Image (cartoon, rainbow, N blue to C red):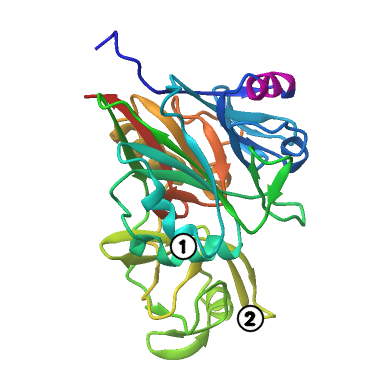
């Protein structure tokens, strides 16, 4: 097996000059950095997303100067990765465009139409779940009034706020890609919450069948908004995390959309978030990690700045993709030899 060429992903924090040199050398890269950094990068074989939060080998980092890079190594010249832009009308093709044997890295800008579409419809896209799709939702510093963007490297300084970017990466036959999720949350035993419309903001709703307002309910019941809304999406527990609550306006902003006709419950409380997250991390097989990302809320609530999450590194994001959109999870991709 050792004489066979394999795809590997090198993940590391790099300086701007080094990243520029890698791009100019024709390397295939996925890049996470602040918009100011992404806008300085030359055209090449890369995709990127805006974010100033990272997990480095030294621990959690918040920086508008740092650049986190996943370098795709072992690319075969006769079967290279393919980089594609998707808009709201074409995102449903992503799984059909995926390599027959390989995986796809996907980045979508937070709160865009393509983000909403993917959130709502990805499980029903043609060929979904045939080839691993993993990735993240780009964002911005939480103190900023900004717009999330993605970068399309083959274009000339193309930063986009309404399109997604993907890198479809073929694998040799002797390699396999697998996607894994770490999710601490289960549906709680409290009230059943339903919403009349789909969206990234919620107000009017029914709670145990009675007309209500989500923001007022959170305030009246003193709900811990570190706990997400959880729903069963075709057997998979999916979190919808709370971004902000304005009780006066009767509005709750969310990191993922709630959907009309779906029953939600606030998650069961967690005794010690940091301890349980670390325990769950140890239960999972985290060898052969090729890519990982973690949610901004795990970063905040676990107080991960300056702390390590084992040997897992990557962007800290506004949402995670493991085939479908997730929130308040850690997602990772492993590459193994058959």
Q: Nearer the viewer, residue 94 or 212?
A: 94
- Give the class, few, some or many, for how many residues have Cα within 10 Å of label 2's Cα (few <14, many ≥20): some
Residue 21 among those drawn in magenta: yes
SS for callout 1:
helix
- Give the class, few, some or many, for how many residues have Cα within 10 Å of label 1's Cα (few <14, many ≥20): some
Q: Residue at x 54, y 60 (%)?
A: 115
Q: Position of residue 236 (x, y in %)?
A: 30, 59
Q: Residue at x 28, y 9 (%)?
A: 2
Task: Choose the circle earlier in sequence order: 2 or 1.
Answer: 1
How far is mark 2 from mark 1, CA to CA? 24 Å
Q: Position of residue 338 (x, y in %)?
A: 21, 24
Q: Residue at x 38, y 51 (%)?
A: 95
Disc nearest the viewer among 2 and 1: 1
Q: Which mark is residue 119?
A: 1
Q: Is residue 162 left or right of residue 176?
A: right
Residue 300 among those drawn in magenta: no
Above or below, 298 against 117 in this view is above
Quadrant of the rendered structure where residue 76 is? top left
Q: Is residue 279 left or right of residue 55?
A: left
Q: Position of residue 17 (x, y in %)?
A: 74, 20
Quadrant of the rendered structure where residue 93 is? bottom left
Q: Which mark is residue 250?
A: 2
The residue segment tinted magenta is 17-24
Q: Residue at x 53, y 70 (%)?
A: 222
Q: Is residue 172 left or right of residue 226?
A: left
Q: Main secondary structure of the magenta part?
A: helix
Above or below, 266 against 10 in this view is below
Above or below, 115 against 182 in this view is below
Q: Nearer the viewer, residue 5 or 285?
A: 5
């Amino acid at each position: 097996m050792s004489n066979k060429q394999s795809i590997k992903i090198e993940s590391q924090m790099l300086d701007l000059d080094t990243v520029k040199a890698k791009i100019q050398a024709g390397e295939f890269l996925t890049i996470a950095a602040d918009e100011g950094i992404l806008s300085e990068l030359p055209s090449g074989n890369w995709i990127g997303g805006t974010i100033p939060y990272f997990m480095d080998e030294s621990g959690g980092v918040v920086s508008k100067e740092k650049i986190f890079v996943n370098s795709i190594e072992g690319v075969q010249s006769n079967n290279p990765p393919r980089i594609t832009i998707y808009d709201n009308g074409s995102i449903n093709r992503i799984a059909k465009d995926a390599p027959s044997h390989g995986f796809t890295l996907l980045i979508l800008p937070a709160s865009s139409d393509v983000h909403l579409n993917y959130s709502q419809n990805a499980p029903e896209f043609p060929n979904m779940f045939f080839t691993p799709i993993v990735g993240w939702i780009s964002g911005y510093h939480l103190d900023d009034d900004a717009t999330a963007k993605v970068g399309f490297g083959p274009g000339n300084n193309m930063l986009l706020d309404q399109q997604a970017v993907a890198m479809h990466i073929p694998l040799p036959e002797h390699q396999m890609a697998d996607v894994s999720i770490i999710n601490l949350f289960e549906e709680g035993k409290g009230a059943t919450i339903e919403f009349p419309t789909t969206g990234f903001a919620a107000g009017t709703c029914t709670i145990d069948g009675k007309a209500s307002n989500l923001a007022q309910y959170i305030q009246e019941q003193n709900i811990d908004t570190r706990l997400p809304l959880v729903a069963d999406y075709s057997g998979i527990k999916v979190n919808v995390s709370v971004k902000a609550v304005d009780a006066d306006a009767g509005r709750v902003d969310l990191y993922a959309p709630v959907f009309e006709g779906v029953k939600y419950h606030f998650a069961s409380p967690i005794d010690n978030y940091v301890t349980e997250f670390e325990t769950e991390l140890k239960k999972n097989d985290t060898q052969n990690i090729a890519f990982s990302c973690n949610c901004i809320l795990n970063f905040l609530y676990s107080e991960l700045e300056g702390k390590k999450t084992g040997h897992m590194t990557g962007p800290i994001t506004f949402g995670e993709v493991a085939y479908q959109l997730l929130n308040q999870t850690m997602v990772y991709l492993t590459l193994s030899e058959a």
